Image (cartoon, rainbow, N blue to C red):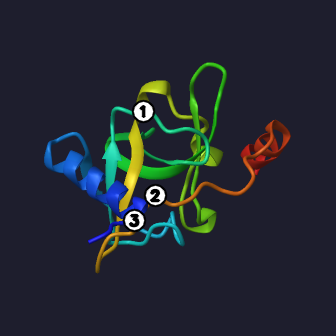
Amino acid sequence: MILSQPTLGALRQVGWWALGRRRRFRVVGPSMEPTLHHGEFVLVDPARPPVPGELALAHHPDDADLLVVKRVAAITPDRAWVVASDNPAAGTDSRQWGPLAPDAVIGRVALVLDRPGARLDPPPPPADPPTRAALARWLRR
């Protein structure tokens, strides 16, 4: 049997989860559609912080017990996280909260698990990362 690189990557992430080095969370709500759908599971790597364009699991700024998955739009010079919903009409993000504190981010989404099976890679980042001017306009919305 020959396995593709994405399949091997997914199996590696599941192996890390089985060893306790990844954490599994269920997605609730539509704020990250079409990337993530209600009911899907994600595996989070707490040892590797996300970079702009990747998905992150973080504590909600108004309720530390509530966890949210958002896309990292930018990291400010003081290491705060600017995060965005992929479906801004259905969720809140840094436009409402401002940047998240440096310790609010738990880790990077390493793998997305569909209900029927596993997607083999995390969702791709947006094609063009935002410029500082575009990010400033986005935050003023």
Occupied quadrant, residue 120? bottom left
Disc 2: which residue:
122
Disc 1: which residue:
104
Amino acid of disc 2: Pro
Is 116 placed left or right of 99 in the picture? left
Occupied quadrant, residue 22? top left
Q: Residue furthest bottom?
A: 116
In percent of the image, x 47 and y 70: which residue is there? 30
In percent of the image, x 45 and y 38: which residue is there? 61
Disc 3: which residue:
4
Q: Secondary structure at mark 3?
A: loop
| Disc 1 from disc 2: Cα separation | 21 Å
| Disc 3 from disc 2: Cα separation | 15 Å
Q: Position of residue 117 (x, y in %)?
A: 29, 75
Q: Secondary structure at mark 2?
A: loop
Front of the two marks 3 and 2:
3
Q: Is residue 106 visible?
A: yes
29 and 21: which one is in front?
21
Front of the two marks 1 and 2:
2
Q: Position of residue 5 (x, y in %)?
A: 41, 59
Q: Is residue 27 visible?
A: no
Amino acid of disc 3: Ser
Q: Residues within 10 Å of mark 3 (few under 14, many from 20)?
A: few
User: In terms of sequence position, does the residue under pointer 3 or pointer 1 come before the other?
Assistant: 3
